């Protein structure tokens, strides 16, 4: 039995993550696993002793001191983590999801994902984490890492949840876009929604044909109403415009087709998209 | 892996009629599947983790370098201030100009920061390697030391490349304690020339310096007390115009940035033979101290490190250092502890320590010359006291005698030879022998006589190997006149050729006394012979080793 995995932290996005997870859970009639990862131990706030000298047994006393500091911090983090999880559980119950489990984990979020992704059908995460509240256009540092680390579809929650009736598939003909189409056609999560498949680029016969094939698949398998479209321009700007003008509630797309090095230098369309569209985005990789 | 399997393939695999799994055409796929069956999901999930952590390279880089910028820069400054007197002192130990140690400390710190395997560990010119160079410098000069440094680096790179770090498992806790204690004693002994036959004023200055170092932190922990010690003693010397030896008397200090140069020696076999023993010793000691320090930093920060990468990093650093006129070095226990204590955690701390060191030396060179040796001696005494494991003295009484013997033997050997490599070798060998001694006692032979008195059954239990072979032989009574002897070795482990030979001897002796000899369970017992240790890989190996 696979569940929806919701990743939460103390950011304002966590409530919306719960709502999005609840939406998916109800549509797919599954439960939700809420996970809070405590993360790598924060080392930067250790009290600084700049005396630069070595006492007798300096090593041992330092070890004891550091260990007890870490212990206190860890206990605090556990307490806070459990509170967050309880809050999330309550929210999910409110949203009508009965089957909710919570997990508190140590370590890196990517390691955690690898340990539970086999039991999960969707991963839900907020656009930004608790440390990123100060700059509204920046994405959380873990988001890209999570998306790159998992084979499962990732739903990136927007700041607040809005019922989803109409969604847009950004179609570029790539492998991950194909995967997205297949998944959308097969998953109960999208049944009965209105769908618009949009391709950005020049309108050639080949693209048109691919688009129609995708649309046919969605109509036949999932029975949804599908419109297709080819628009010219910068992908992120065009799609963001379509989302605004067409009352789109969710964008589905393939993600991070390029290497990290490449996206470091020329930037990533995926990152731009998540940033500029103010709706939730579901990513397939 | 699982997700990409087509349903058709799965059914093929599951269907025994299709024969072995291999014909599918993708051997690694098949292997993954077969492990998946034994341990659902576990094995291939791990593969995935590794590959995605590799693509996480940039993230790791960023957190190792810039995860703790403020703490790292501050700690780097504290460490640089502490490195200067040490680099000068270790140059003096090796018999070279202070600038040789200072350039070395700069380059080793900066390079290990970039290529090393343990973020936050401080490497520079060290006492452990300096004491090995004394005779080379005295007999052949600085240029040969530079060649030896490059060669030592090369050896270390090779050691890292063949993953020699795992050999560290043979260095027991007692040997490590012996190592740090011996190191502390060597550092202290190196200060004696500055403390014997000197004006009484020197003692006053050293005592004053030590008082500042240890007492100032009680007042404030915001400024490095060794720095204040240097400033106050230098100020006193200059202000009162005291006639004391200064750092400037010990040789050249850096006046500009280091440059690349080839050592000025004939590149022939003779040179190689001169430097090789020194290089080998430096390489071994350097790696030992570096890996030991890496474990200490691992423990302090509760993180892990890549030990083989550290070996390569130390090697690269030493090779480069030889070419800019610096002496060989390695990781420093004391400085690394100071770094962690000052809040340094990332690579940036080591990097900053190296950069600050060079800037301070080049900019303040004329002032550094004025520092009295007494200040340096005081700081080195502090390092010596801080390096020594004082708890080990108390443990001498409470720990098992064998571990105390190993620790003391290591210390004594090092102090006698001034070579930490020999000390560690002695310690490791001794701990091996003492361990064999202990295990040899896990052994007994019992026997029962048959009712008619003509037959006896010997039951051998425990470990039979070279150290217990004699006891094994002595446990049989060949004077007893018997018709039949049964030796049951099914509950024993025969580890080596010595024990096989002893068993042969026993059989032969009984036959010569006219007895029929039967050995029971030999196949089981001899499965443990060293050359067949591969059985550990097979399922149930532990049960067979321990159970019978």
Image: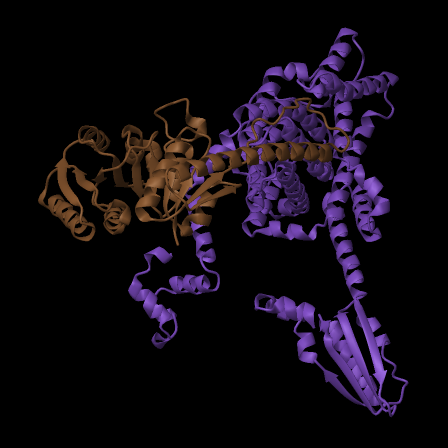
Q: Chain A hue?
A: brown
In the image, is residue B88 above or below residue A164?
above
Along the line of sight, the residue nearer the viewer: B304 or B170? B304
Along the line of sight, the residue nearer the viewer: A32 or B238? A32
Along the line of sight, the residue nearer the viewer: A238 or B378? A238
| Color style of the picture | by chain
Residue A164's x, y, as percent?
A: 26, 37
| Residue at image coords 14%, 41% | A227
Q: Which quadrant: the C terminus of chain B?
A: bottom right
Q: Is residue B400 visible?
A: yes
| Residue at image coords 74%, 84% | B519
Quadrant hosting residue B262: top right
In the picture as drawn, the residue positioned furthest to the top comes out as B239
In the picture as drawn, the residue positioned furthest to the right comes out as B479
Residue A281's x, y, as percent?
A: 30, 37
Q: Which quadrant: the N terminus of chain B?
A: bottom left
User: Chain in purple?
Assistant: B
């Amino acid at each position: 039995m696979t569940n929806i995995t919701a990743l939460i932290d103390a950011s304002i996005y966590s409530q919306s993550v719960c709502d999005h997870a609840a939406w998916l859970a109800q549509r797919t009639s599954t439960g939700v696993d809420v996970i809070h990862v405590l993360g790598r131990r924060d080392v930067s706030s250790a009290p600084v002793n700049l005396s630069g000298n070595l006492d007798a047994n300096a090593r041992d006393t330092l070890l004891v001191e550091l260990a007890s500091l870490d212990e206190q911090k860890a206990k605090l983090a556990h307490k806070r983590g459990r509170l967050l999880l309880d809050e999330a559980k309550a929210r999910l119950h409110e949203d009508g999801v009965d089957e909710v489990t919570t997990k508190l984990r140590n370590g890196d979020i990517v390691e955690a994902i690898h340990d539970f992704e086999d039991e999960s059908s969707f991963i839900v995460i907020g656009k930004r984490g608790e440390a990123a509240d100060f700059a509204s256009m920046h994405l959380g540092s873990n988001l890209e890492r999570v998306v790159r680390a998992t084979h499962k579809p990732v739903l990136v929650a927007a700041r607040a949840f809005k019922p989803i009736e109409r969604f847009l598939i950004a179609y570029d003909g790539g492998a991950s876009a194909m995967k997205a189409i297949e998944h959308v056609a097969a998953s109960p999560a999208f049944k009965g929604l209105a769908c618009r498949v949009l391709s950005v680029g020049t309108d050639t016969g080949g693209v048109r044909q691919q688009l129609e094939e995708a649309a046919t698949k969605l109509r036949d398998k999932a029975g949804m109403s599908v419109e297709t479209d080819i628009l010219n321009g910068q992908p992120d700007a065009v799609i963001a415009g379509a989302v605004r003008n067409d009352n789109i509630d969710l964008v589905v797309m393939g993600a991070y087709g390029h290497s990290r090095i490449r996206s470091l230098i020329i930037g990533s369309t995926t990152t731009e998209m998540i940033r500029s569209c103010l709706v939730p985005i579901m990513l397939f990789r | 892996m699982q997700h990409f399997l087509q349903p058709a393939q799965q059914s093929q695999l599951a269907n025994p009629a299709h024969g072995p799994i291999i014909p599918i055409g993708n051997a690694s796929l098949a292997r993954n599947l077969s492990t998946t069956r034994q341990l659902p999901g576990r094995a291939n999930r791990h593969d995935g983790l590794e590959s995605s952590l590799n693509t996480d390279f940039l993230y790791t880089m960023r957190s190792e370098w810039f995860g703790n910028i403020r703490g790292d820069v501050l700690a780097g400054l504290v460490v640089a201030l502490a490195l200067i007197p040490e680099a000068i002192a270790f140059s003096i130990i090796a018999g070279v100009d202070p600038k040789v140690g200072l350039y070395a400390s700069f380059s080793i710190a900066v390079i290990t920061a970039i290529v090393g395997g343990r973020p936050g560990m401080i490497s520079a010119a060290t006492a452990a390697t300096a004491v090995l160079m004394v005779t080379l410098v005295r007999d052949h000069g600085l240029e040969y030391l530079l060649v030896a440094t490059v060669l030592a680096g090369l050896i270390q790179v090779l050691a890292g490349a063949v993953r020699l770090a795992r050999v560290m498992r043979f260095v027991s806790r007692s040997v490590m304690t012996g190592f740090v204690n011996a190191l502390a004693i060597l550092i202290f002994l190196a200060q004696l020339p500055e403390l014997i036959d000197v004006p009484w004023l020197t003692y006053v200055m050293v005592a004053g310096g030590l008082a500042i170092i240890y007492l100032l932190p009680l007042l404030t922990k915001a400024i490095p007390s060794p720095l204040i010690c240097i400033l106050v003693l230098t100020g006193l010397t200059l202000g009162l115009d005291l006639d004391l030896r200064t750092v400037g008397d010990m040789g050249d200090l850096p006046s500009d940035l280091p440059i690349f140069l080839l050592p000025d020696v004939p590149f022939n076999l003779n040179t190689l033979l001169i430097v090789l023993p020194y290089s080998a010793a430096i390489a071994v000691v350097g790696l030992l101290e570096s890996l030991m320090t890496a474990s200490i930093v691992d423990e302090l920060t509760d993180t892990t490190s890549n030990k083989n990468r550290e070996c390569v990093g130390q090697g690269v650093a030493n090779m480069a250092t030889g070419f800019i006129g610096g002496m060989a070095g390695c990781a420093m226990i004391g400085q690394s502890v100071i770094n962690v204590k000052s809040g340094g955690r990332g690579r940036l701390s080591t990097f900053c320590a190296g950069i600050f060191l060079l800037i301070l030396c080049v900019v303040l060179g004329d002032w550094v010359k004025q520092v009295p040796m007494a200040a340096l001696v005081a700081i080195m005494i502090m390092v010596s006291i801080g390096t020594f494991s004082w708890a080990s003295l108390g443990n001498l009484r409470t720990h098992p005698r064998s571990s105390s013997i190993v620790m003391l033997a290591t210390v004594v050997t090092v102090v006698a030879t001034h070579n930490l490599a020999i000390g560690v070798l002695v310690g490791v060998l001794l701990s091996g022998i003492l361990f064999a001694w202990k295990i040899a006692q896990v052994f007994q032979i019992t026997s029962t006589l048959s009712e008619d008195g003509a037959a006896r059954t010997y039951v051998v239990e425990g470990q039979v190997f070279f150290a217990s072979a004699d006891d094994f032989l002595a446990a049989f009574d060949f004077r007893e006149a018997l018709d039949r002897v049964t030796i049951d070795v099914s509950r024993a482990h025969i580890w080596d050729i010595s024990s096989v030979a002893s068993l042969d001897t026993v059989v032969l002796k009984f036959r010569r006394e006219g007895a029929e000899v039967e050995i029971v369970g030999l196949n089981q017992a001899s499965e443990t012979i060293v050359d067949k240790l591969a059985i550990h890989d097979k399922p149930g190996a532990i049960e067979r080793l321990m159970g019978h």
